[in-house]
């Protein structure tokens, strides 16, 4: 249990701390090969807006999510590198229908996008008992009920 807490705290520090917070203030000149590293989606290279987006989505902070998505619509497709969650996954997990409508409806995000464990938003909505969200994902946004996660289970097998 102590190890789990340490591991999750370590992941949080990577997500929240600025790039030079690890004490490494070395600046190197960037050439074309460095650009590839910057585009890799590395947690340490995420800018403040991406970090704020992930934290606000995890908290279910609808008003801030609306504001950030309006400022930078590309954030809607951004996946948390640690677990593969998008805003839609967080909305489904929390049962927040407003977030589902914003992300899947207004911003047309892929409702069948998978996490690192293979879960879709539908898997998460059902796992956490949010039937209204699950119904909305299926009927309005055409979520695929037959997608299996990486352990081989379809969403309804979690009921």
Image (cartoon, rainbow, N blue to C red):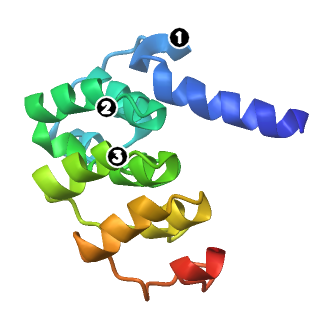
Residue 12 point in image, percent of width and height:
58, 28
User: Separation of disc 1 and disc 2 at Cα?
Assistant: 34 Å
Q: Tell me: residue 102, above or below residue 121.
A: above
Which residue sits at x=43%, y=54%?
Answer: 92
Q: Which residue is mark 3?
A: 87
Label 2 element class: helix
Q: Earlier in the sequence, mark 1 or mark 2?
A: 1
Q: How would you rate the neighbour count of disc 2 (Cα within 10 Å): few for under 14, some for 14-19, many for 20 or more?
A: some
User: Separation of disc 2 and disc 3 at Cα?
Assistant: 10 Å
Q: Which residue is mark 2?
A: 62
Q: Nearer the viewer, mark 1 or mark 2?
A: 2
Left or right: where 44 falls relative to 155: left
Q: Which residue is mark 1?
A: 23
Quadrant containing the C terminus is bottom right
Q: Which mark, by number, is residue 48?
A: none
Q: Tell me: residue 156, above or below residue 73.
A: below
Examine the rendering and report whether any part of residue 116 can be seen.
no
Which residue sits at x=49%, y=45%?
Answer: 94
Q: How would you rate the neighbour count of disc 3 (Cα within 10 Å): few for under 14, some for 14-19, many for 20 or more?
A: many
38 or 1, which is in the foreground? Answer: 1
Left or right: where 49 falls relative to 155: left
56 or 26, which is in the foreground? Answer: 56
């Amino acid at each position: 249990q102590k190890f789990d807490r340490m591991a999750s705290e370590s992941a949080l520090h990577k997500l929240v701390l600025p790039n030079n917070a690890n004490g490494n203030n070395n600046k190197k000149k960037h050439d074309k090969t460095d650009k590839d590293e910057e585009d890799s989606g590395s947690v340490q290279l995420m800018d403040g807006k991406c970090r704020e987006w992930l934290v606000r989505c995890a908290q279910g902070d609808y008003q801030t999510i609306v504001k950030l998505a309006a400022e930078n619509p590309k954030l809607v497709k951004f996946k948390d590198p640690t677990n593969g969650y998008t805003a839609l996954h967080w909305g489904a997990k929390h049962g927040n229908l407003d977030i589902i409508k914003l992300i899947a409806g207004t911003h047309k995000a892929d409702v069948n996008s998978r996490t690192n464990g293979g879960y879709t938003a539908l898997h998460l909505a059902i796992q956490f008992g949010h039937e209204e969200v699950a119904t909305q994902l299926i009927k309005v946004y055409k979520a695929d009920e037959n997608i299996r996660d990486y352990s081989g289970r379809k969403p309804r097998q979690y009921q």
